[in-house]
Image (cartoon, rainbow, N blue to C red):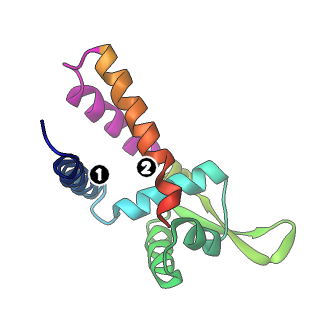
Amino acid sequence: MPSRDQSVATIQREMTAFARRARAAAARMHPELSLVSFTLLSHLEDQQGCRATDLAAYYMLDKSTISRQIAALERLAFIERRTDPDDHRIQLLHLTPAGTAKLAEAAELRKQAFHERLAEWEAADLEQFAEYLLRYNSTASSWS
């Protein structure tokens, strides 16, 4: 039976491999978009728009990193700036119809990929894996 340290090392290695595959998949879907870009698009969809500073704070990223990502998304016409109706000095970022369509396309491709990869798994194994991922991700906020 592997030791706790060996198990943690295996988890770390496999999570790193998972992250690399996710970045590669994002690059295949749209070569100009990074995984971070897709994450930002998803956040904007979930929040129905927000400020760039909110994105930086939420993802604990430097404002310059967020600015570069936003500029790329604007060039691709996936996001647009709108004036905040409550404070006309503030610009809110929102998905454009093209951004919404790209996000939906990516979600469908991801869903298909997961169904293919997990096709041979038993329902109980899928349920257990889902529970473990929920448990693992629920502790993510303690990593800041």
Residue placed at 58% from the left, 65% from the top?
Answer: 58
Q: Nearer the viewer, residue 111 or 125?
A: 125
Q: Amino acid at mark 2?
A: Lys
Determine contact: label 1, label 2, CB under 8 Å: yes
Q: Position of residue 129 (x, y in %)?
A: 33, 30
> Which residue matches tag 1?
29
Disc number placed over residue 102 in the picture, else none: 2
Residue placed at 66% from the left, 59% from the top?
Answer: 49
Q: Position of residue 63 (x, y in %)?
A: 53, 82
Residue placed at 63% from the left, 75% from the top?
Answer: 53
Q: Main secondary structure of the magenta part?
A: helix
Residue 101 appears in view: no
Tell whether position 118 is magenta.
yes
Q: Amino acid at mark 1?
A: Met
Tell whether position 121 is magenta.
yes
Q: Position of residue 131 (x, y in %)?
A: 42, 30
Q: Nearer the viewer, residue 79 or 20?
A: 20
Q: Secondary structure at mark 1?
A: helix
The answer to whether residue 25 is left or right of residue 89 is left
Magenta extent = 101-122
Q: Secondary structure at mark 2?
A: helix
